[in-house]
Amino acid sequence: MKEIGWLFVNAVQGLLLAVWTVVCCVIVVLVMPFGRELPLRVPRLWSRALLWLGGIRLRVEYEAEIDWSQPHVFVMNHQSMVDIPVACLAIPVPIRFVAKRVLAFVPFVGWYMKAVGMVFVDRSKSAQAIASMQKAGELLRQGASIIAFPEGTRSPDGRILPFKKGAFMVALQTGTPIVPIAIHGARECLPPKSFRPRPGTVRVKVGAPVPTDGLSVSDRDELVARVRNTILRMNRELGGPGGDERQHVAPRGDRVRARTPQGAARTA
């Protein structure tokens, strides 16, 4: 009986979320003529309703002062689809996600993401991946902030995976500070490959910005290790398992190549 009760609750949650998502997409269409920044504020409305519908509470801690008026590259460990609305609420400024290209084809959500200029990456196609990283770099140069999940996929067990290099390359090429973010509790509220949310608390820690100005491509792996070590430490402080400290950079089997401003190709 308890399982049947949860199936009913989840069905109602799904219906209400679908309706609210459509409403938010309509709002985006209506405000789009007044500029691209206004639609970027709609996800906060969408995110608050999503967490409320799931009975999910959010606790955010900031370890340092951040100048939110400046562009940043936010990098966050990935546990669940809940991470997306959590990021929208934990970061109090409009952000563009660097997301898998498959999300572009999700009804309503994908349409919204394309409309406001989110960055989609198809790692199976190197030319498209290069163009995506170049677009992310251009957004940063224009003063926008981006967020990426450098593990590239949701962790199957909560342990933080090695990081892919694309977001770090873009930060290095543009001299943009990287802000590490750790999340814990999201997979308990909505496990991977599940669409059945459960009440709970998601905890987030936002670390101090890591400067990249003055660093070069040769500093890339050291930068990845520094940022990932910070996220591992914050994740453990939140009650999470952290991850393997012996391998910070993802294997080279899944490679994305980015170009420096001078045009020289580099592995991302």
Image: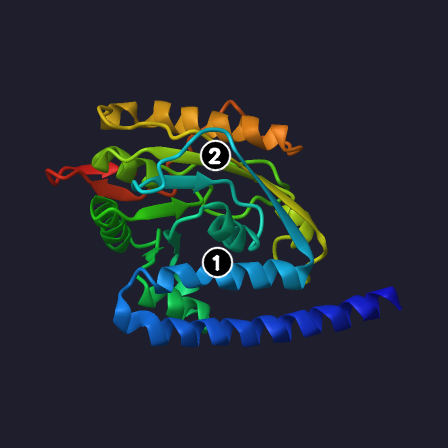
| Amino acid at the residue labelled 2 | Pro
Left-right relation of 230 to 188: left
At x 86%, y 65%, the residue is 2
What colour scheme has been applied to the protein in the rendered image?
rainbow
Q: 116 or 250: nearer the eye?
A: 116
The part of the image, by quadrant, that contains residue 202 is top right
| Amino acid at the residue labelled 1 | Arg
Residue 234, above or below 142: above
Q: Which residue is mark 1?
A: 44
In the image, which is nearer the foreground, mark 2 or mark 1? 1
Residue 63, above or below 41: above
Left-right relation of 247 to 261: right
Residue 170, above or below 6: above
The part of the image, by quadrant, that contains residue 196 is bottom right
Disc sitting over residue 162 in the figure:
2
Residue 74, above or below 116: above
